[in-house]
Image (cartoon, coloured by chain):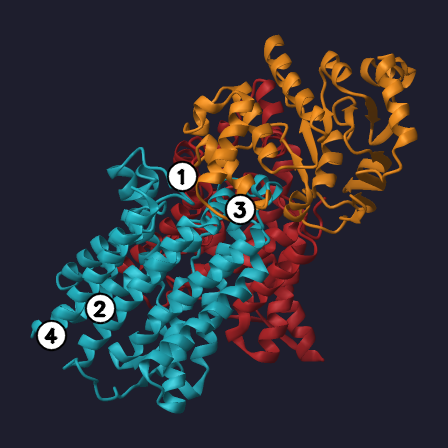
Chain colours: A orange, B cyan, C red
Amino acid sequence: MTQGIVQDIAQDVTSAAAPLLEIGGLTKTFGGFTALDNISVDIRKGERFGLIGPNGSGKTTLINCISGALRQNAGSVMFCGEDITQLPPHLRARRGIARSFQIPRPFKSMTVLENLMVGLDFTAGHHVSGLPEEEAAMSILARMGLAAKAGAPTDTLSQVELRKMELARAMAMRPKLLISDEAMAGLSHSEVDEVLDLLISLGDEDITIIMIEHIMQAVMRFSRRMMCLDAGRIIALGAPDEVMANKRVQEAYLGT
Amino acid sequence: MTKRSNSIAFWAGVAVFLVAVTAMTQIVRNEYPFFAGYVILQFVVLSVAWSILGGYAGYVNFGTNAFFGVGVYTAVALFKVSGAPLVVQIAAAGVVGMLLGLAVGLLTLRMRGIFFSIATIALAIIIETTVMNWRFVGGAAGIQLQRPPVMEPFDSYVKMLFFVQGVLVVIAVAIARYIQNSRIGRGLQALRDDELAAECTGVPTLKLKLVACMISGGLISAAGAPAAMYLQYADPSSAFNLSYSVSVLAMSLIGGTAHWIGPVLGAILLGTTQQLLAVTISSEVNVLVLGIMLVVFVVAAPKGIIGLLRPRYRLRAGGKT
Amino acid sequence: MDLLLGAVVLGVLLGCFYAAVSVGLSVSFGLLDVPHVAHPAFLVLASYCVFLLNDRYDIDPLVAGLIITPLFFVFGLVAYRIYYEIFEKRGTDAAVRGIAFFFGIAFIIEVLIILQFGVDQQSVSASYIGKSWRFGEFRIPIRQLVAFAVALGLTSLLALYLSKTFMGRAIRAVAQDEEALRLMGANPVRIKQFAFGIATAVLGMAGALLIIVAPVEPTLDRAYIGRTFCVVVMAGLGSMTGTLVAAIILGVAETIVLTLFGASWAPAISFGMLLAVLAIRPQGLLGR
């Protein structure tokens, strides 16, 4: 882990580039309930960022606000230096924000390949239909280990295959920022490793990744920096070791 | 089948169809087949048009009668004002229908599907009420119309209307087929499956829904325009008759909405049956049967006839049919 | 000014009637999320049943309403079971098919009524219909007062039921968190079925009120689809008090416009209000 911290500091010192994603004072309420309370954080380009917190702490709400699925009540979201706070989800997707859903949301009337084609058609900037697109989609599927299932309807996929397809579809969008929302929930040990290795290899390609996860070993292994939410507030932000050692984080998970 | 050979097959089919329609007008003497045929072709256009929004996007329009009636009355108004030729009436009706589709869409397509559906019912009531109070086109009592002289090569006005409706069938099917096979079709399919996921995958859901609604509305109104000349009479209660909504809904869903051929089949089958039965049973029972068949199919055969014929069939949006 | 005041008073009376008519939809659409566009058709069907009993057997319409209430309860139980088996369970294209299904049912009901009763208006006769009550400057038809009183009672009864009884609270619970209820050992489907039965039973009585208030004809359901959905959405889905408040607002708005501009624009009011609420405050006036 020390190496990670050193790399981080080195990146800090040498990189003068603006952060990829800047969240400023983000607040989201549902009626009387405050889901997000004045959240501010910057995500740097190429970062492997872990987001943890007990159930109901606001993780998915934060993701929804970043991707545009929810409108925030206050605050701003900047992406690549552009203010995207008022943009609808599809325009944010076009600018490079891709997300997977906690419970997979496949397009059920389409095959696996066709699911990816949606991403390619509408986001990756390919406007020509025909062979090149399908090849691109197939190569992504091959990488995810789903090539054999390309022509299969989505209702024949297992849980782990659905999760991988979610990520594959997000990848088909050629994103700058990929947000994975509990992609490993309920998977077996080896399946977790499969998905984790996938995400790490994507991270190696300079795609910025935010990972929400409950499986601590996975998050620890993956993240270079971590943030913990509790009741809509940031209670810890920093290197994984520091965050996990933080008393408030431990309390939040284990209760006082 | 490659995309190219599929296109050739399609347009060859279109050519054959148009030749057949034209030949029929020149050869057949009896007027009755053209009266019946006009109605059937009209329902083909209406069903294909309805399916562009209802089938591809999954937003159920209950107000087909509103758009149809608007088409009828646009033609009537235009004809009364300027004696405009049929082609102009149809084009104008199409434009008005598109604008209406845009208006309804902007108001309701941001919301859940059921609110769009209810909006279309209300739209029908409001427009019908407005037209009933519009003296210029005859109000509630209706208006008689004098047909202009028929043009060569047709020897009767009904035969010409039959041909015109045949052309509208080609236009509607060509548009539906284009949408189905294009990026738009894939986007509509995605938003029908899961609108939020589609939006987050980059699909501009509102824009696509509006486009589908406008095209659908425009075609429905265009199909209604010749009806004024067909009947030589127009009145609100028949132009805005709810049976149009039910029939088109039934024909599209019974035919199957995954592919443009579904509504075509549904309209031909059910339209022909209706014409045959019209002599024997009352119009109420006729439409009642249609309503019952709608419910039966929605319950038992959700993918419609095309689903029964080819169970493994998948809508290959962006694909090769 | 007096004209306006009279309109407001009548509007409040009408509004309470609208509440009784819509409260069933608050349960079926508001709480259970069933796309029940056939709700007004069921209402009109109930009216015609009341008409039948009144016309043929001289039964007072309110009594007739009570008679058909248990029948409509059973009708609701069966209807929900069918809807659930076919649509909620299967899930493919369920939204489109569900809406189309109810539209088809509404249409079938309308045509069956036409075939049985004809297209003309029908009304009931009772001792309180035809007379008016002098109230200072105003004359209020007694049938409106009767409908108002019964409607108020009906709505309050349902509201009390949902908040005070065990079953009532189970119904509200299932609307909020079905999974939790299932984990507690309750059968959510049974509960929803029962709720739908109650919603339909209320329609039985509401149908009686409908034909008391004014003559009915087979296509009346179309006018009421806008009104009932407008009330339910304005109320905030599932709120009973909200239903009453929203209905009264609609009633007053309609009566004022009716007095000033005439009757043809009534459907436009409810629909316009529905759109406004959906655009501005989709959770309803009293929703959370």
Image vertical order of residue B176 relative to residue A120, above or below: below
> Do the CB atoms of the residues marked 1 and 4 lie less than 8 Å apart?
no
Image vertical order of residue C110 relative to residue B35, above or below: above
Residue at the disc numbered 2: B38
Three-letter amino acid code at disc 3? Gly
Q: Which callout, 2 or 4, points to the residue nearer the camera?
A: 4
Residue appearing at x 17%, y 66% in the figure: B19
Q: Determine which quarter of the picture holds residue B273.
A: bottom left
Three-letter amino acid code at disc 1? Ala
Q: Could you tell me how far apart the alpha carbons at marks 2 and 1 are, in whole angstroms?
A: 39 Å
Residue A196 in sight in this render = yes
Mark closer to the chain start, 1 or 3: 3
Mark closer to the chain start, 2 or 4: 4
Residue appearing at x 50%, y 59% in the figure: B211
Q: Which callout, 1 or 3, points to the residue nearer the camera?
A: 1
C248 or B110: nearer the viewer:
B110
Binning the other alpha carbons within 10 Å of mark 4 as few (below 14), some (14 to 19) or many (20 upward) gives few
Q: Could you tell me which chain the residue with mark 4 belongs to?
A: B
**Residues tagged by mark 1 and mark 3 found on one chain of the structure:** yes
Residue at the disc numbered 1: C79
Binning the other alpha carbons within 10 Å of mark 3 as few (below 14), some (14 to 19) or many (20 upward) gives many
Tag shown at residue B26: 4
